[in-house]
Amino acid sequence: MANNEGALFGDEEKYQVMEPCNYASNLVYYHAATRLCNYPKWSLDEKWQLAAKRAASVLAVGSAWWHGSETYLGYVFDNDMIKIIAYACAQAAVSWSDSPILINMSADKEYIHSLDIINEMTEQIAEHPHETWAEKLRSYEYPFDRIMIGFTLNTIYLIFPYWMTEIIVSLVSDLYSLGSDPKEEDTKFWNEIWLPELHKELKDVPISFEDTAILTFTFISYFIKIILAMCMQEYMIPFDLFWNSTGLEIFAWFQVIINEMASWTSYIP
């Protein structure tokens, strides 16, 4: 997808785009931002809606900036905004709760809220010179290493019975903690602190079979897209089989099928 020699537009080098294909693909991010602005079925309140629109808009520009320029500032706005959006999604999923454990994904630390980060970055871009943007974005501390597993396990709790959730949380936390330090602390947090706290908050909330089914299909869709992004689009889990012209052509054909599978939830009434 990348072309590090770039493509020149106009008569001057300042119009050079370093990764033309990746730069053009960011059009999808712009579509996501406009769709959020027009989305009619929000279950979150207005402050979360505004944050989602702002974050998607910043990521659209930031990702295009990175792939178009390959500058440090573009890199920060692409990668760090993805992390912040993931952080916001994890907190939005428990926004109904006042529990600091669920909100901070920690038993003993309180992090800056994702809403504050997004609002501050919007102000930073609008009112301060670009030389300050990367430093500001990188100054925030939040539990990124726990965001994805927290969001995932929260969904698993809503789908499966509690006894089964306990087993899954134990297995997933052990697997997730293989590369972390310290392992025992993270495993203990998810099993002995986070899960009982989530259960206390949700045990009396009825969830219909229809809602469970929709959530299950949505979770499968999310999982497929995440795995696809890690395996191919972000090069996080590279497979040598694909790194040649034939492999890339095969995967381009296969990706259409995967995208269709990941869109199944769109067909649910």
Image (tube, rainbow, N blue to C red):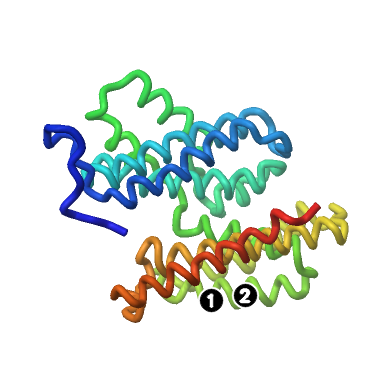
Instruction: Specify the quadrant that holds the N terminus.
Output: bottom left
Q: Residue at x 31, y 44 (%)?
A: 76
Rendering quarter of residue 268: bottom right
The residue under label 2 is 170
Q: How far apart are marks 2 and 1 (CA)?
A: 6 Å
| In the depicted structure, whether residue 109 falls above or below residue 45 | below
Q: How crowded is mark 2: few (under 14 residues within 10 Å), some or many (20 or more)?
A: some
Q: Residue at x 19, y 49 (%)?
A: 6
- Seen as rendered, the residue at the extreme left is 12
The residue under label 1 is 174
Query: With 211 as the anchor, is 149 left or right in this view?
Result: left
Q: Position of residue 92 (x, y in %)?
A: 62, 43
Q: Is mark 1 on a helix, strand or loop?
A: helix
| In the depicted structure, whether residue 260 falls above or below residue 119 | below
The front one of 139 and 46 is 46
Q: Which amino acid does label 1 sit on?
A: Asp
- Seen as rendered, the residue at the extreme top is 127
Q: Which residue is drawn at 74% across and 56% down?
A: 267
Query: With 126 as the anchor, is 47 left or right in this view?
Result: right
Rendering quarter of residue 40: top right
Q: Which amino acid does label 2 sit on?
A: Ser
Query: With 93 as the anchor, is 88 left or right in this view?
Result: left
The answer to whether marks 2 and 1 mark residues whose Cβ atoms lie closer than 8 Å is yes
The front one of 15 and 165 is 15
Rendering quarter of residue 246: bottom left
Q: Position of residue 31 (x, y in %)?
A: 51, 39
- Seen as rendered, the residue at the extreme bottom is 241
The front one of 211 and 26 is 26
Label disc, if present, on residue 164 of the rendered structure: none
